[in-house]
Image: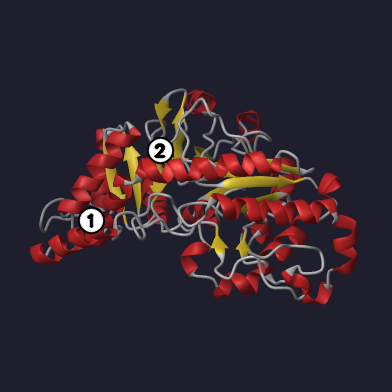
Amino acid sequence: MVKKTINNLAILGGPPLFTRPRHVGQPNIGDRGKLIARINNILDASWLTNNGACVQQFEREIAELAGAKHCIATCNGTMALEVAIRVLGMQGEVLLPSFTFVATAHALQLQGIVPVFCDIEPDTCCIDPLQIEKMITPRTSGIIGVDLWGNVCNVDALADIARCYGLKLLFDSAHSFGCSWNGNMVGSFGDAAIFSFHATKFVNAFEGGAVVTNSDATAAKLRQMINFGFAGIDNVESVGTNAKMCEASAAMGLTSLESLDEFISINRRNYMRYKSNLADISGLQLVPCNEKEKHNYQYVPVRNKRALTGMPRDDLVKVLWKENVFVRRYFYPGCHRMEPYRSLYPGAGSVLPETQRLSDEIICFPTGQSVSLEDVDQICGVLRLLVENAETISEVLPREAQVDVTQHAVRAPLQLIVK
């Protein structure tokens, strides 16, 4: 193990802390033998897609875990968003946070719906109900609440607003599968919620998603929507698309679910170790979670308070990437500062001070099955070195040689750089 000093930082030519990169979102695999057995059963049955046995079982288990009446599995979380938005009849304008993965906004824009960006709460980092009512217009048809890093939106406040103004309420719960709000599991709120089971999620289906709802009518429409609008073998009743989950993905999803408690236990172990290490590093604030609720701990988000650390967030990121610690800036720079939104809505940032502050501070750290407690200690040791010697390090950093995180992201496995 490399003992880190200022002089042997990798960005200054020293050996990296890790020979094998530590990633945010390194896929959890689960029991490989059980996965292979499921795949063999699929091949033996020659039923690879179109609502096979694995998809049906996966839907039942997700619905039960989420406390929802219905689960409709999809090929990915983005398609879950798109079909849910369409089935719920959203149109005109929909309120959502800018601090989210861009797919949330794209799912609206692709359907000709204007995403209206709302600011976030400084503590939970989720959409701020106090800001929502100010932005409702006669064209507003719905609200998308985005759960972040396992922190759940203020469900009760959003439901009250939606009820008062006759708006649809959809939750993008890609980050909060297995979490709870006031003791109730995520997935049982609003008109519907979506999950992501992408490779980066602690429960993954290779690539997959789901919509959960307690409405029989919504569930029936969703099932038609994800299968070209078919109602029966050759009877098409509505416009639809192909958003079905295949059997291989469901097999991986079922295998992941069998290890759910183990994955959460590892994530919590790492989260608490980061928390302990960061407690005495000035200016690096772990985003808190409500430990009275169920939480998946699949992200370790940390705010860099530059006035205290003495280093810009992006300098910390660049130094860590050179050490093969592939931290991420979630969700930098905010949807409103991405195209096409920054051109379509150039004034959006004027009402998003918390969003802009957070997007310039946040760093998410590696965790999951592939990260050990020793890894966490080593990573935090580098952070402590950087903060304690911020002025000296800033002076010796080769500005022209700093890491371009975009270039590194292109070379990193694709599944590690998406939501």
Residue 220 visible to an observer of this rendering:
no
Q: Number of labelled discs?
A: 2
Most foreground residue, 214 or 341: 214
Left/right placement of residue 344 relative to residue 63 reads: right
Q: Position of residue 388 (x, y in %)?
A: 83, 51
Give the residue type that dot 2 points to.
Gly
Point out the tag, 1 or 2, that comes first from the N-terminus: 1
Residue that mark 1 sits on: 34
Residues at discs 1 and 2 in contact (Cβ within 8 Å): no
Disc 2 is placed on an element classified as loop
Name the residue at 70% across, 60% down: 317
Name the residue at 70% across, 49% down: 348
> Image quarter for residue 45?
bottom left
Left/right placement of residue 303 relative to residue 149 reads: right
Q: CA distance from mark 1 to mark 2?
A: 22 Å
Q: Is residue 297 above or below residue 162?
A: below
Most foreground residue, 155 or 252: 252
Left/right placement of residue 49 relative to residue 110 reads: left
Residue that mark 2 sits on: 178
The N terminus: image quadrant: bottom right
Mark 1 surroundings within 10 Å by alpha-carbon count, few (fewer than 14), some (14 through 19), many (20 or more): some
Q: Nearer the viewer, mark 1 or mark 2?
A: 1
Give the residue type that dot 1 points to.
Lys
Mark 2 surroundings within 10 Å by alpha-carbon count, few (fewer than 14), some (14 through 19), many (20 or more): many
Left/right placement of residue 284 relative to residue 372 reads: right
Most foreground residue, 238 or 216: 216
Q: Position of residue 373 (x, y in %)?
A: 55, 49
Most foreground residue, 373 or 348: 373
Residue 371 visible to an observer of this rendering:
yes
Q: Is residue 159 above or below residue 146?
A: above
